[in-house]
Image (tube, rainbow, N blue to C red):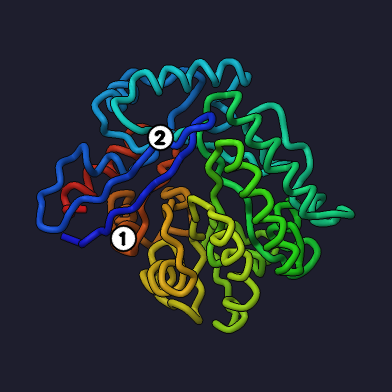
């Protein structure tokens, strides 16, 4: 049994903090519903499956992540979110990616991309407006958390994050200022924010997408700490409630494990050196970067043992979440 300290998972509803992820104390057997509280489920189509609603009603789900295929309109999503909240016996995180620009799941903005925000005359002010617009869209649809902002410090035009306009800047101070402004605005409006993808994907070249393939960010530890992690220090100082580690490998920090499965990166750096005490939520467990790391269940166990609190099962398949929960229960996590 791995000792897992109590974590407070703050996911604000409209003006109210209502979710707490309570860790299991060491030495106590873990039941399947406890394990399921670590899992963020996904599903196909516009209508939530009856089996998923049942699991929610039994307190066996930590959250739901919504994708474009689940959303016909903000009004339709609000009805679905209300259905999940009604079914839930306790807290339930209702999440999506609302970054701005090309990555908006819910209609309503923000229209500006991170790149446009960072290049504006007043980047921090523009980022504040971006965070407010994201919160308005998600809050209006009944969601509680935004898996944004991206805090990658890109290195050159056309690299992985820059090509999709998902990086605020190649200047870590601009990224830090924009990220902190976005976070304060979103959370001030009642939507929990998530800084991603720790310790940073800014140096990933064009096409280096962990959703599809393995990615190695081969930078010196000193550079990772002084440049790529700098925006996360600012995000933590701003009170960010969630951090999502990347699935890239950073040989200077841990040559054997992707960040989201690395105790060194999550415990020594994120928790220890940077002092983050909020919720660590993984990127998609089905990512191509994890092809060499076993089944969904094996990946889930490895991530939680490294220090993850919540697991994103984003394959739009309830069975994926069930496999992760069953593996955690079997492992006593």
Q: Nearer the viewer, residue 324 or 189?
A: 189
Give the residue at x 67% y 49%: 182
Contact, CB < 8 Å: mark 1 with mark 2? Answer: no
Q: Percent position (x, y) of residue 96?
A: 54, 37
Q: Nearer the viewer, residue 4 or 234?
A: 234
Alpha-carbon neighbours of circle 2 within 10 Å: few (<14), some, or many (≥20)? some
Alpha-carbon neighbours of circle 1 within 10 Å: few (<14), some, or many (≥20)? many
Q: Quadrant of residue 275?
A: bottom left
Mark number displayed over residue 18? 2
Disc 1 on helix, strand or loop? helix
Q: Percent position (x, y) of residue 193?
A: 55, 46
Q: Percent position (x, y) of residue 284?
A: 46, 48
In this rendering, the answer to whether 132 lies above or below 29 is above
In this rendering, the answer to whether 74 lies above or below 153 is above
Q: Which residue is mark 1?
A: 302
Q: Nearer the viewer, residue 82 or 61?
A: 82
Q: Quadrant of residue 97?
A: top right
> Can you tell which of label 1 and label 2 is closer to the viewer?
2
In this rendering, the answer to whether 219 lies above or below 63 is below
Quarter of the image for the N terminus: give it.
Answer: bottom left
Give the residue at x 62% y 78%: 226
Disc 2 on helix, strand or loop? loop
Q: Percent position (x, y) of residue 159?
A: 73, 63
Q: Nearer the viewer, residue 231 or 224?
A: 231
Q: Quadrant of residue 190?
A: top right
């Amino acid at each position: 049994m791995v000792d897992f300290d109590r974590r407070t998972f703050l996911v604000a509803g409209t003006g109210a903090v209502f979710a707490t992820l309570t860790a299991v104390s060491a030495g106590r057997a873990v039941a399947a519903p406890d394990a399921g509280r670590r899992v963020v489920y996904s599903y196909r189509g516009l209508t939530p499956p009856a089996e998923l609603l049942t699991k929610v009603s039994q307190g066996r789900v930590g959250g739901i992540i919504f994708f474009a295929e689940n959303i016909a309109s903000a009004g339709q999503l609000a009805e679905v979110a209300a259905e999940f909240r009604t079914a839930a016996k306790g807290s339930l995180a209702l999440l999506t990616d609302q970054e701005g620009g090309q990555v908006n799941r819910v209609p309503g903005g923000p229209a500006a991309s991170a790149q446009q925000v960072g290049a504006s005359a007043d980047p921090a002010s523009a980022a504040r407006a971006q965070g407010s617009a994201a919160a308005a869209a998600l809050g209006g649809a009944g969601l509680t958390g935004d898996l944004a902002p991206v805090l990658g410090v890109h290195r050159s035009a056309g690299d992985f994050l820059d090509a999709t306009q998902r990086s605020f800047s190649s200047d870590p101070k601009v990224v830090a200022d924009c990220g902190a402004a976005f976070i304060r605005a979103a959370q001030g409006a009642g939507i929990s924010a998530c800084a991603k993808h720790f310790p940073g994907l800014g140096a990933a070249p064009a096409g280096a997408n962990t959703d599809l393939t393995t990615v190695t960010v081969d930078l010196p530890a000193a550079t990772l700490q002084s440049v790529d992690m700098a925006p996360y220090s600012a995000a933590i100082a701003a009170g960010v409630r969630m951090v999502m580690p990347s699935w890239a490998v950073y040989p200077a920090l841990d040559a054997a494990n992707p960040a989201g499965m690395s105790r060194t990166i999550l415990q020594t750096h994120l928790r220890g050196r940077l002092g983050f005490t909020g919720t660590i939520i993984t990127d998609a467990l089905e990512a191509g970067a994890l092809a060499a790391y076993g089944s969904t269940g094996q990946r889930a166990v490895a991530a939680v043992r490294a220090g993850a609190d919540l697991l994103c099962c984003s394959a739009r398949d309830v069975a994926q979440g069930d496999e992760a929960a069953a593996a955690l229960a079997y492992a006593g996590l």
